[in-house]
Amino acid sequence: MKTRIDHLTFIVTLFFIFSFAGAAEAQQKTIVLFSPGVEDNTFWKNIETITEAASNDFQYNFEVYYGDDNPDKVAENIRRVTSRTNKPDAVLFPDMSGNGEEFLKISDENGVPALVINMGVNTSEAGFPRQKYKNWIGQIIPDDIDAGYLLAKKLIFEAKENQAYQNGKIRILAITGREQDIPSIERVAGLKKAVDEEANVDLLDILYTNWTSEETEEVLHAKMKADDRIAVVWTASDQMGIAASEVLAEYGKKVNQNVFVGGIDWTTEGLKAVQDSRMTASVGGHLIEGGWATVMLFDYFNGKDFKNESTMLKTPMSVVDENNVDLFLSKIGNGNWGRINFTLYSKVHQNWDKDYRFTIETMLIQLR
């Protein structure tokens, strides 16, 4: 009799083991990132890598699709993925050239929760999360006004310290992204705010580009040929800042001596450019937003909806310059984001209800 009971117990145990395993597999969620750029876009490659690292921590499937700098392709990617039979559990994407609401409409119609990251949607038209589009569950974007402001203040300070005046003025040239892109608009607003606070500073011009090195070089060459009396070149991305420094060198300008150049993004290349004195500074903190979004999604799926804090979060930004660049590069320069344990930021995992602390500083503590 004992043998029969043991045999029955073994069968029941196996049943529960396989049932649990099957349920766990069935419950494994899929997160999809729609990158707006080409596959080798440096900044978005970082976001992709970090989002994948966070997805691994939460045992999520992760997929990425590239838009090749074409909003129509991004829209088609979202439409194809959210309408398939095995729909993802959530999608991440930025606004792109004002097409963010179209992206939201597609995901909403297909019943897939969407988190907007990095570039915010125009709320005057699309409303706010969970209103007009019920499946638009939230947005986490950088504090771009502060980013533009911090970069401008840093560059102006260095230019004044080094007496880079022309006829008593610090002359600034700004190079930014597309005129209709919200990050471009807000970063320029921060720049203008900083300029308004400073005496003896002239903002000569704001040059708009498609966020590329090639266009940056083109517009800066044209400007330098007309007037090379520039002390500060403020750019809205590290990629553009590096390109600008290369052009300036052709005109005999030396970064951190007679010209001061900065960008925004904290890309590895940008940080190395700061370390090598090819740029004066880089402002960032937002490249980890895909990781933060994954944390928020995990909590959302597991009963701690981030709406109790906010559906519109902003990533704080910080300056990296010659004083702290070695520290930053030693921690994140190799792109080894798998060293970060993203579960430590989850309200579910940590069983707390306090506000998220999505800062680069809290992340770096783990990498000591």
Image: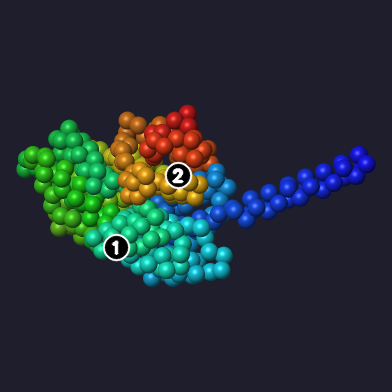
In the image, residue 40 sits, relative to residue 155, either above or below, namely: below
Q: Which residue is mark 2?
A: 304
- Which one is nearer the viewer's eye here, 354 or 166? 354
- Tell me how many marks there are: 2
* Residue ID at (90%, 44%): 4
Residue 334 is at least partly visible in this image: no
Kind of element beneath mark 1: helix
Residue 240 is at least partly visible in this image: yes
**Labels 1 and 2: the sequence-earlier one:** 1
Kind of element beneath mark 2: loop
CA gap between label 1 and label 2 equals 25 Å
The quarter of the image holding the N terminus is: top right
Please tell me whether mark 1 or mark 2 is closer to you in this view.
Answer: 2
**Residue 357 percent location from the top left of the image:** 38, 37
Image check: 349 left or right of 38? right
Image check: 333 left or right of 28? left
* Residue ID at (37%, 44%): 308
Report crowding for label 1: few under 14, some 14 to 19, many 20 or more residues within 10 A (C-alpha): some
* Residue ID at (30%, 57%): 128
**Residue 324 percent location from the top left of the image:** 35, 32
**Residue 69 percent location from the top left of the image:** 38, 64
Q: Which residue is mark 1?
A: 126
* Residue ID at (16%, 48%): 192
Amino acid on which disc 2 is placed:
Lys
**Residue 122 percent location from the top left of the image:** 27, 60
Amino acid on which disc 1 is placed:
Ala
- Which one is nearer the viewer's eye here, 345 or 215? 345
Q: Do labels 1 and 2 touch, CB within 8 Å?
A: no
Furthest toward the top, the residue is 368
In the image, residue 262 sits, relative to residue 176, either above or below, namely: above
